[in-house]
Amino acid sequence: MTLSDILKEIKEKWPDKIADNSHFFLDGEWFRDEATLGDYDAKIQKSNLRVLVKCSDRPLRLKLPDGSIKTVTVDQRDTVFQVIQSLGKKLGLFHFFKHFLFCFFVFLKKKFF
């Protein structure tokens, strides 16, 4: 039984307690939906912590160059590259990753050089 199957059963029993985009979380790591609890058994026993079911979506506030602030929802399980791509799509910017890297290197140059 995969973790996504277990989450479906939990949502059926307690629909008001579990958000739609919830996933298993333990000690800074999001579990893969296609995995089983057996895949994480050693980590669960070693950490001696509770496995949490958390919503992976969170709001992210961005200050745009024109001074306006826009709030977008990002998935915390995504890689940095995936988050940057989704921000570019949501903001309607093409080649957002190139602009992000340019701004990041300008920031580093001002900060450390």
Image: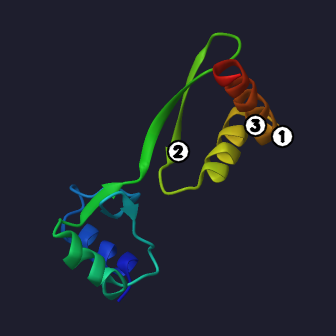
Q: Quadrant of the N terminus?
A: bottom left
Residue, disc 2:
74
Give the residue displayed 66% in from the left and 46% down from the top. 86
* Rendered position, 103 above or below 79: above
Say which label, 2 or 3, has the lower sequence index.
2
Give the residue displayed 76% in from the left and 41% down from the top. 97
Residue type, numbered disc 3: Leu
Crowd band around label 3 with a 10 angstrom C-alpha radius: few (<14), some (14–19), many (20+): few
**Real-space Cα separation, disc 1 to disc 2, in angstroms:** 18 Å
Query: Is label 2 or label 3 in front?
Result: 3
86 left or right, relative to 47 = right
Image quadrant in which you'd find residue 63: top right
**Real-space Cα separation, disc 3 to disc 1, in angstroms:** 10 Å
Residue, disc 1:
95
Q: Quadrant of the C terminus?
A: top right
Residue, disc 3:
101
Label 3 sits on a secondary structure element that is helix
User: How is the model colour-coded?
Assistant: rainbow
Residue 65 lies, in percent from the top left, at 70, 15
Residue type, numbered disc 2: Val
Most foreground residue, 52 or 73: 52
Label 1 sits on a secondary structure element that is loop
Say which label, 3 or 1, has the lower sequence index.
1
